[in-house]
Amino acid sequence: MPPKVRLIIIWLVVIFLLYSVINDPERSADVVLALWDVIWGAIANIGKFFEELFTGSIGR
């Protein structure tokens, strides 16, 4: 992707995010909290996977 196109896309995303926060801050906060829950759940599940992987292989 050419650098100018990438820069334009980044600016459009930033402008859209600012517009969303200014236009409806409560819904924006809900979206951020939902994304945080997804990220935290993924991290917890990855940790659980490795815990099971290591404890399961050591116990056998």
Image (cartoon, rainbow, N blue to C red):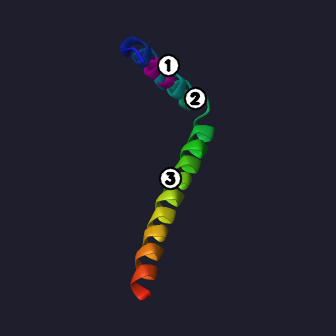
Please state which amino acid type lies under the numbered disc 2. Answer: Ser
Q: In this view, does 30 lie to the left or right of 10?
A: right
Q: Distance between the residues labelled 1 and 2?
A: 12 Å
Label 1 secondary element: helix
Specify the quadrant that holds the N terminus.
top left
Magenta residues? 9-13
Disc 3 target residue: 39
Please state which amino acid type lies under the numbered disc 1. Answer: Leu
Q: Which of marks 3 and 1 is nearer the N terminus?
A: 1
Q: Nearer the viewer, mark 2 or mark 3?
A: 3
Disc 2 target residue: 20
Q: Nearer the viewer, residue 46 or 8?
A: 46
Q: Main secondary structure of the magenta part?
A: helix
Q: How far apart are marks 3 and 1 (CA)?
A: 24 Å
Q: Distance between the residues labelled 2 and 3?
A: 21 Å
Q: Nearer the viewer, residue 31 or 25?
A: 31
Q: Residue at x 46, y 25 (%)?
A: 14
Label 2 secondary element: helix
Q: Is residue 54 above or below residue 10?
A: below
Identify the mark at residue 12; answer none if there is no mark: 1
Please state which amino acid type lies under the numbered disc 3. Answer: Ile
Q: Which of 57 and 10 is in front in this view?
A: 57
Q: Which residue is drawn at 50% across and 19% down?
A: 12
Numbered-mark total: 3
Instruction: Where is residue 39? Give x, y as percent.
Output: 50, 52
Instruction: Where is residue 42? Give x, y as percent.
Output: 51, 57
User: In the rendered structure, are the residues bearing label 2 and label 3 in contact, judged by CB atoms less than 8 Å apart?
Assistant: no
